[in-house]
């Protein structure tokens, strides 16, 4: 059921964890930032390997009107308009930077490239009879695609590049592809979604496509995100979220019955979906269970989620909405601590917190709650540890782990 109390709608969900051991941890913080615009910010791009520079692009209204590109150099705290610097531009749908300096932007009858961080932009001709470039993504600095809506038959096209966008080649067979959203799963595997709840898959870098799922006629799938070739999430109408762990052979469903989710993210076993009313949902168990972790302002739509290298991130949306978050995805991929190969996971069904070490025995585990109070100290003598936490209050916990005269700290969210 949709949560809509005025009290929740005016709160930004924020927790601060202060431990007596002098460890300071911010837990699940979401903060609205001033983007400097009220345009619809459809897309974000954060170049890899850094935690300060990000770009966003969008449109004044839903369809072809005025466009804008904005940039931050302080991790989303402040933003400036970098295009157009004067006059107006056609509106934009997608933006993608392969480095902090080199990027592309796609919109209505306009596809542009920059190699100086957005100071100057050069229009490019990728296809013919294009009235809208509606999808754009790069797997790495060389390999990428852009899709387009055309004025005439076949009315849709996908263009591929393997030289960093210098040249583009039309994909050969895209009849089965969904035209609304397309995402890389790995360098050669892509998934697309579209009308009639269609999901299609390409295993040759986007050159040919096969339909792998179809659902209700006249319903739409809106967005798709894959963390690898096996694990992905698709968002549909009425709050539908579909997850797969076998490259699209089978799917599991969750639905709020209300939201349109466009903004998706997937790391380790954790997923995030942002959508209608600026609401954000989260799964910590590979999409088996979802819960609302942020109650928005009830007015705006979220469209994209991107991450900085340090694990913090940004979410953009309509009305110039820009939200910065920290400590939502608890740990790096698979919650792995590299120095002692420690993996943690919380099972929301059995209410157990689990640890596994690939190399050393886990000797001791100490758990603190959100107020910094000691919850429990446990001894252990194996490479695995499991604790029933069903009696723990819901919230974020800090865990200190000792192993072979080393200590590590990690977090888990109990719900």
Image (cartoon, rainbow, N blue to C red):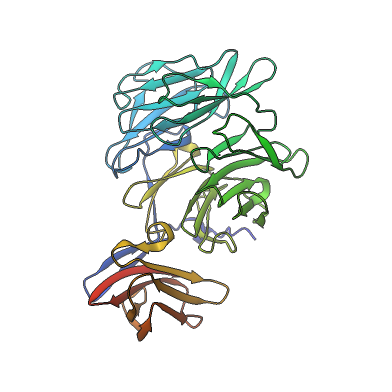
Towards the viewer: 204 or 295: 204
Name the quadrant containing residue 172: top right
129 with respect to 79 (left or right): right
Q: Quadrant of the N terminus?
A: bottom right
In the image, is 47 to the left or to the right of 302?
left
* Foreground pick, 58 / 308: 308
Quick check: can you spot residue 323?
no
Measuring from the top left, give residue 224's x and y in whole percent.
57, 43
Q: Is residue 202 visible?
A: yes
> Which percent across, then down, holds residue 2?
62, 58
| Front in this rendered view, residue 374 or 357 | 357
Which residue is depicted at the point 43% across and 23% down? 165
Q: Which percent across, then down, holds residue 12?
A: 43, 57
Q: Quadrant of residue 78?
A: top left
> Outermost residue toward the right?
217
Relative placement, left or right, of 408 versus 219 is: left
Residue 271's x, y, as percent? Answer: 51, 55
Q: Count numbered badges in the picture.
A: 0
Q: Is residue 178 above or below residue 163?
A: below
Residue at image location 62% in from the left, 49% down from the top: 259
Quick check: 199 above or below 59? below
């Amino acid at each position: 059921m949709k949560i809509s109390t005025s009290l929740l709608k005016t709160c930004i969900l924020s927790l601060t964890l202060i431990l007596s051991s002098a460890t300071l941890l911010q837990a699940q913080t979401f903060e609205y930032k001033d983007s400097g615009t009220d345009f619809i910010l459809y897309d974000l791009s954060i170049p890899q390997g850094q935690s300060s520079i990000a770009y966003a692009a969008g449109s004044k209204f839903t369809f072809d009107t005025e466009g804008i590109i904005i940039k931050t150099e302080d991790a989303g705290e402040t933003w400036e308009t970098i295009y157009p610097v004067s006059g107006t531009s056609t509106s934009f749908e997608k933006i993608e930077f392969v480095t902090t300096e080199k990027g592309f932007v796609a919109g209505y009858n306009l596809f542009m490239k920059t190699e100086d961080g957005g100071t100057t932009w050069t229009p490019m001709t990728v296809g013919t009879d294009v009235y809208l470039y509606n999808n754009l993504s790069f797997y790495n600095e060389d390999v990428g695609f852009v899709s387009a809506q055309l004025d005439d038959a076949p009315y849709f096209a996908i263009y591929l590049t393997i030289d960093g966008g210098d040249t583009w080649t039309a994909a050969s067979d895209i009849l089965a592809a969904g035209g609304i959203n397309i995402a890389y799963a790995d360098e050669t595997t892509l998934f697309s979604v579209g009308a009639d709840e269609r999901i299609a898959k390409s295993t040759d870098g986007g050159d040919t496509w096969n339909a792998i799922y179809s659902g209700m006629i006249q319903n739409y799938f809106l967005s798709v995100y894959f963390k690898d070739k096996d694990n992905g999430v698709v968002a549909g109408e009425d709050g539908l979220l579909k997850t797969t762990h076998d490259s699209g052979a089978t799917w599991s469903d969750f639905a709020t019955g209300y939201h349109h989710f466009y903004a998706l993210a997937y790391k380790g076993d954790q997923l995030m979906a942002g959508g209608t009313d600026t609401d954000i949902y989260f799964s910590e168990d590979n999409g088996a269970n979802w819960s609302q972790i942020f109650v928005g302002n009830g007015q705006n739509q979220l469209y994209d989620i991107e991450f900085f290298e340090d694990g913090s991130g940004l979410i953009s949306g309509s009305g110039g909405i820009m939200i910065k978050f920290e400590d939502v995805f608890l740990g790096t991929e698979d919650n792995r601590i590299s120095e002692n190969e420690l993996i943690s996971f919380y099972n929301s069904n059995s209410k157990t917190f689990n640890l596994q070490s690939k190399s050393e025995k886990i000797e001791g585990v100490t758990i603190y709650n959100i107020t910094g109070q000691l919850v429990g100290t446990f001894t252990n003598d194996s490479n695995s540890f499991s604790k029933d936490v069903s009696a723990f209050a819901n919230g974020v916990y800090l865990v200190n782990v000792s192993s072979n005269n080393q200590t590590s700290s990690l977090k888990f969210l109990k719900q």
